[in-house]
Image: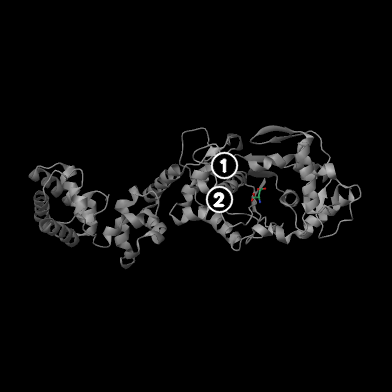
Amino acid sequence: MKTRFAPSPTGYIHIGNVRSAIYPYLLARQNQGTFILRIEDTDQARYVEGATELIEDTLKWLGLDWNEGPIVGGPNAPYFQSERKSHYIDWAKKLIAMGRAYADDTSPEKIQEYRDQCARAKVPYLYRNFRPENPPEWHEGLPLRFKSDPKPRCWHDEVMGDMEAGPEVQDDIILIKADGLPTYNFGHIVDDAEMGVNYVMRGVEYLPSTPNYIALYEALSLEVPKLVSLPHILAPTGGKKLGKRDGAKSVTEYRADGILPEAMLNYLACLGWNDGTEQEIYNKDELIQKFAIDKVQTSGARYDEVKLLWMNGQWIRKIADEQGIDALYERTLDFWPEIAANYDDEYKKQVLSIIYDRLKTLSDLRDMTSYFFVDPTIDLNMVTGNKFLKKFSEEELSTMLQLTVEKLKGADWTQNNLQNLLNQLLEETNKKPAELFSIIRIALSYAPFSPALHLTMEVLGKNIVLARLQKTIAALEND
Ligand code: GLU
């Protein structure tokens, strides 16, 4: 089995583009087949510098290794369409020789005239209705068109089922453009045939053009590969295709935000496919094992960023629990707040070990851990405005903190002991946990959230804990 991912290097890696890479990858790996990466860079106007590297880098990040393609090479090199010009010309010449392709020297103005004429007559515009009787001989620099033979066509789509289309959707499509490069419509057919691709998986947006592709396969006496249309990814509100404006970031941005590749792969693989069970978390090997085309859904799948974040949180925990904190820590190196740079790895690992189960993305570390590295700014509004603390006077709050300082001063600084001391304090002060622990937590972190108090204290260390408690006591007294 040979599958391929054939992106165009336009610089922006949309969620949907990546999913079009994942399914063919899974299918190829499941069948010990070949997964090809081919760069479809024939649209010079849309080409973006560095976009190919971005594609390669994203696939590597996701763990989608390719057997043939850029960097690794292969028997069908080159894998850039812009370097395969002679291949398309050879196939085009075959069509010319058979009388199935002709040069098109119609000016854009003339084409516009044809279009206007059709609009006035309220009939769809089809170039073949204006096909010239005596086209000039073809040479490079002139567009080359397919001479279609419109007729009813049937084919099978592995996801969408049995399909049929009438002659009205078949036209004399352009094969070679004026710049000498092929259109997508022609280029991909030549490449898939030469490269031996037998499963063509791509977005459902190519479905309407498929009758034209079938006609081309037929004209070239090529076997039609298995055709697999992948449903659209829909905007979170449903109804329409997910676009840049719907809040979905590019894969590059999600990566920079600290989405793990395992989570991205898992989430996108399950967007439009499920194995019929309740399972939601899959690693790559499980996906390879379980992926099945007949379980790819035919309707669009709604993009849900909340779910992606949830899944990422699950993966953060999974890595910590299965591979250990050191393994998770390696993934976090780019995501700590700047001030953490002065601290050693061991200390950051301790912080990570008590906070990882609250992270949704790795970049949450930036906002959620600063008080482990720098004294927080005192903000008494957080104390007096707290819903559990509102009812106490500043004096009462200060007393609670003083009693805490007394209790902790000579303490043996282990989490078990700290836990016991905090429980004793609850009894001695006759306060509820939400009350006593809120004032201590705020004095230590001035953050909306922190891990369990005894763990936070253990990591911060005695000196810092006592100093921060004292500072808030002083602030309450001087207020
Ligand atoms: N170059 C096309 C795209 O990026 C590929 C479509 C296909 O997979 O055949 O949309």
- Where, by quadrant of the figure, is residue 198 drawn? top right
Is residue 295 placed above or below 54 in the rendered structure? above
Hey, which residue is sitting farthest right in the picture? 134
How crowded is the residue under tag 2: few (<14 C-alpha within 10 Å), some, or many (20+)? Answer: some
Q: Is residue 441 visible?
A: no
Earlier along the polypeptide chain: callout 2 or callout 1?
Answer: 2
Place of residue 112 in the rendered image (x, y in percent of width and height, measured from the top left): 77, 48
Foreground pick, 120 / 72: 120
Q: Is residue 458 left or right of residue 63?
A: left
Which tag is nearer the camera, tag 2 or tag 1? 1
Q: Residue at x 71, y 33 (%)?
A: 163
Foreground pick, 423 / 122: 122
Place of residue 214 in the rendered image (x, y in percent of width and height, measured from the top left): 76, 41
Q: Residue at x 61, y 54 (%)?
A: 66
Residue labelled with disc 2 = 14
Is residue 444 placed above or below 158 in the rendered structure? below
Q: Secondary structure at mark 2?
A: loop
Which three-letter amino acid code belongs to the residue tagged 1? Answer: Lys
Q: Secondary structure at mark 1?
A: loop
Residue labelled with disc 1 = 241
Q: Residue at x 23, y 60 (%)?
A: 377
Please state, as top left, top right, bottom left or bottom right, where the C terminus lies in the image.
Answer: bottom left
- Where, by quadrant of the figure, is residue 464 drawn? bottom left
Q: Is residue 172 left or right of residue 262?
A: right
Mark 2 close to ligand 1, CB under 8 Å: no
Place of residue 269 in the rendered image (x, y in percent of width and height, measured from the top left): 53, 43
- Give the image's coloring scheme: one colour
Hey, which residue is sitting farthest bottom in the picture? 342
Q: CA distance from mark 2 to mark 1?
A: 12 Å
